[in-house]
Image (tube, rainbow, N blue to C red):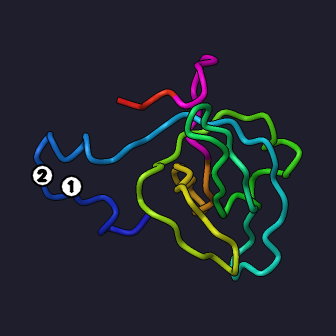
Amino acid sequence: MQDAELEAPAMTPFDAFGVLDMRVGRIVKAEPNVKAVKPAYKLWIDFGALGVKTSSAQLAALYRSEDLEGRLIVAAVNLGDRRIAGFKSEVLVLGAPDDEGRVVLLALDRDVPIGGRIF
Protein backbone atom coordinates (compact mmCIF):
# COMPACT_ATOMS: atom_id res chain seq x y z
CA MET A 1 0.00 0.00 0.00
CA GLN A 2 1.08 3.56 -0.69
CA ASP A 3 1.77 5.79 2.34
CA ALA A 4 -0.95 8.19 1.14
CA GLU A 5 -3.50 5.37 1.37
CA LEU A 6 -2.64 4.85 5.04
CA GLU A 7 -3.19 8.48 6.05
CA ALA A 8 -6.47 9.30 7.78
CA PRO A 9 -8.88 11.15 5.49
CA ALA A 10 -10.20 14.58 6.40
CA MET A 11 -13.24 14.49 8.67
CA THR A 12 -16.62 14.71 6.92
CA PRO A 13 -19.85 15.84 8.56
CA PHE A 14 -21.95 12.82 9.57
CA ASP A 15 -24.89 14.08 7.48
CA ALA A 16 -22.76 13.72 4.34
CA PHE A 17 -22.90 9.93 4.72
CA GLY A 18 -26.64 10.03 4.06
CA VAL A 19 -26.06 11.57 0.63
CA LEU A 20 -24.46 8.38 -0.67
CA ASP A 21 -27.09 5.75 -1.46
CA MET A 22 -25.54 2.30 -1.07
CA ARG A 23 -27.72 -0.73 -1.75
CA VAL A 24 -27.57 -4.51 -1.80
CA GLY A 25 -27.88 -6.05 -5.24
CA ARG A 26 -27.62 -9.49 -6.81
CA ILE A 27 -25.52 -10.00 -9.94
CA VAL A 28 -27.77 -11.62 -12.53
CA LYS A 29 -25.35 -11.56 -15.47
CA ALA A 30 -21.58 -11.08 -15.86
CA GLU A 31 -19.54 -11.06 -19.04
CA PRO A 32 -16.05 -9.83 -19.94
CA ASN A 33 -15.76 -6.16 -20.87
CA VAL A 34 -13.32 -6.81 -23.69
CA LYS A 35 -12.95 -3.10 -24.53
CA ALA A 36 -11.80 -2.16 -21.02
CA VAL A 37 -8.16 -1.11 -20.59
CA LYS A 38 -7.84 -3.21 -17.41
CA PRO A 39 -9.54 -6.64 -17.23
CA ALA A 40 -13.14 -6.07 -16.17
CA TYR A 41 -16.64 -7.49 -16.32
CA LYS A 42 -19.88 -5.99 -17.52
CA LEU A 43 -22.37 -6.63 -14.74
CA TRP A 44 -26.16 -6.57 -14.65
CA ILE A 45 -27.29 -6.22 -11.05
CA ASP A 46 -30.83 -6.60 -9.68
CA PHE A 47 -31.70 -4.06 -6.99
CA GLY A 48 -35.31 -5.14 -6.47
CA ALA A 49 -37.68 -2.16 -6.73
CA LEU A 50 -34.86 -0.04 -8.21
CA GLY A 51 -34.62 -2.45 -11.13
CA VAL A 52 -31.63 -3.95 -12.90
CA LYS A 53 -28.64 -1.60 -13.17
CA THR A 54 -25.37 -2.03 -15.04
CA SER A 55 -21.76 -1.64 -13.94
CA SER A 56 -18.28 -2.26 -15.30
CA ALA A 57 -16.05 -3.60 -12.53
CA GLN A 58 -12.37 -4.62 -12.47
CA LEU A 59 -12.98 -8.02 -10.90
CA ALA A 60 -11.37 -10.32 -13.46
CA ALA A 61 -8.18 -10.88 -11.44
CA LEU A 62 -9.97 -12.81 -8.69
CA TYR A 63 -13.40 -13.80 -10.02
CA ARG A 64 -14.80 -15.82 -12.91
CA SER A 65 -18.02 -14.57 -14.50
CA GLU A 66 -19.88 -17.74 -13.51
CA ASP A 67 -18.83 -17.25 -9.88
CA LEU A 68 -20.18 -13.69 -9.87
CA GLU A 69 -23.66 -14.56 -11.12
CA GLY A 70 -26.05 -14.93 -8.18
CA ARG A 71 -23.69 -13.19 -5.76
CA LEU A 72 -24.87 -10.42 -3.43
CA ILE A 73 -22.87 -7.18 -3.71
CA VAL A 74 -22.92 -3.66 -2.29
CA ALA A 75 -23.01 -0.73 -4.71
CA ALA A 76 -23.38 3.04 -4.67
CA VAL A 77 -26.45 3.68 -6.82
CA ASN A 78 -26.69 7.49 -6.93
CA LEU A 79 -23.38 8.61 -8.43
CA GLY A 80 -24.74 9.04 -11.95
CA ASP A 81 -23.99 7.16 -15.14
CA ARG A 82 -20.55 6.83 -16.75
CA ARG A 83 -19.43 5.16 -19.93
CA ILE A 84 -16.57 2.75 -19.36
CA ALA A 85 -15.06 1.27 -22.50
CA GLY A 86 -18.32 1.95 -24.32
CA PHE A 87 -20.49 0.33 -21.63
CA LYS A 88 -23.01 2.29 -19.56
CA SER A 89 -22.05 1.95 -15.88
CA GLU A 90 -24.94 3.09 -13.66
CA VAL A 91 -23.65 1.99 -10.25
CA LEU A 92 -20.29 1.64 -8.49
CA VAL A 93 -19.72 -1.84 -7.09
CA LEU A 94 -17.76 -1.60 -3.82
CA GLY A 95 -14.63 -3.54 -3.02
CA ALA A 96 -11.24 -3.21 -1.38
CA PRO A 97 -7.75 -3.99 -2.69
CA ASP A 98 -5.85 -7.03 -1.49
CA ASP A 99 -2.06 -6.96 -0.95
CA GLU A 100 -1.52 -7.18 -4.71
CA GLY A 101 -4.04 -4.45 -5.60
CA ARG A 102 -6.70 -6.86 -6.88
CA VAL A 103 -10.29 -5.90 -6.12
CA VAL A 104 -12.02 -8.01 -3.45
CA LEU A 105 -15.78 -7.54 -3.30
CA LEU A 106 -17.39 -6.38 -0.08
CA ALA A 107 -19.37 -9.36 1.17
CA LEU A 108 -22.47 -9.75 3.31
CA ASP A 109 -22.28 -12.59 5.81
CA ARG A 110 -26.02 -13.34 5.59
CA ASP A 111 -28.67 -13.28 2.89
CA VAL A 112 -30.57 -9.99 2.94
CA PRO A 113 -33.28 -8.64 0.62
CA ILE A 114 -31.99 -7.08 -2.58
CA GLY A 115 -32.47 -3.35 -2.81
CA GLY A 116 -31.87 -2.96 0.93
CA ARG A 117 -30.12 0.25 1.92
CA ILE A 118 -26.72 0.14 3.61
CA PHE A 119 -26.49 2.25 6.75
- Front-most of 48 and 4? 48
User: Does residue 113 belong to the magenta stretch?
Assistant: yes
Task: Characterize the magenta stretch by its predominant secondary structure.
Answer: loop
In this figure, which residue is indicated by the disc labeled 2?
Answer: 11
Q: How far across and down, in percent of the image, does residue 78 sit? A: 42, 53
- Front-most of 58 and 62? 58
Q: How far across and down, in percent of the image, does residue 9 sit? A: 21, 57
| Residue 61 - label | none
Question: From which residue to which does the magenta span run?
Answer: 105-115
Label 1 SS: loop
Quadrant for residue 40, please give it. Answer: bottom right
Which quarter of the rendering shows the C terminus?
top left
| Residue 8 - label | 1
Which quarter of the rendering shows the N terminus?
bottom left
Q: How far across and down, in percent of the image, does residue 21 sit? A: 38, 43
- Front-most of 22 and 60? 22
Quadrant for residue 105, please give it. Answer: top right
